[in-house]
Amino acid sequence: MSDALHIAVIIASTREGRFGPTVATWFAARAAEHGQLTVDLIDLADHPVSTVLGNTPDPGMSDLTARLDAADAFVVVTPEYNHSFPAGLKSVIDWHYTQWQAKPVGFVSYGGIAAGLRAVEHLRQVFAELHSTTVRDTVSFPNCWDKFGPDGNPLDPAAEVAAKTMLDQLAWWADALRTARTIRPYAA
């Protein structure tokens, strides 16, 4: 591959006291070490988004929109709220359309015993509607609060293997879809 793929790692939770930044920071470091990727860590808490949709996007989202547009691939780092994903993430997804098209999306989930996997299953349906390709393998942390050490790294080395597997799949899809979009623009 001639030039690096640009991946946006999105912290989906905006709640006070959230665990997402710990998980996302660790994962973004794994992505940066991958060798084929440049990483843009996007914290949705830094981009206040209205959950009320109108006819035009909030002008305050122009920076976020540009960052999403620049990405060749996405990784959503999400908890599970009430068997689904956070409302702020849904708003960001709904405010954008072409930014997601013909690009791959991977998932890192965390939470209680279900590890956020129900949120991931809902997100797969949403991203399919936006003409995105979701990668099969995920990274998930059940009972996440007990799974990370004081240094911010997972205690179980299997997390590193899961991250590499998912990043390899994401890089393959990102390269293939970027090449395809260059040869022939995607028409939804």
Image (spheres, grey):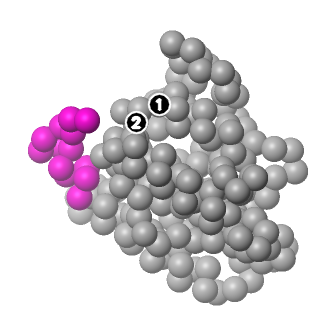
Label 1 Cα neighbours within 10 Å, binned few <14 / some 14-19 / many ≥20: some
Q: Indicate left or right for 171 with 32 as reference.
A: left
Report which residue position mark 1 lands on.
96
Of 3 and 117, which appears nearest the observer? 117
Q: Which residues are magenta?
A: 176-188
Label 2 Cα neighbours within 10 Å, binned few <14 / some 14-19 / many ≥20: many
Q: Indicate left or right for 95 with 72 as reference.
A: right
Of 114 and 174, which appears nearest the observer? 114
Total labels: the figure holds 2
**In this rendering, is residue 167 above or below 162?**
above
Q: Indicate left or right for 91 with 31 as reference.
A: right
Amino acid type indicated by mark 2: Gln
Does residue 186 belong to the magenta stretch? Answer: yes
The extreme left residue here reads 183
x and y percentages locating residue 184 in the rendered image: 13, 41
Tell me, yes or no, whether the two marked residues, 1 and 2, touch with CB atoms within 8 Å.
yes
Report which residue position mark 2 lands on.
99
Q: Quadrant of the C terminus?
A: top left
Residue 45 appears in the rendering:
yes
Per the picture, the main secondary structure of the magenta-coloured stretch is helix
x and y percentages locating residue 116 in the rendered image: 68, 63
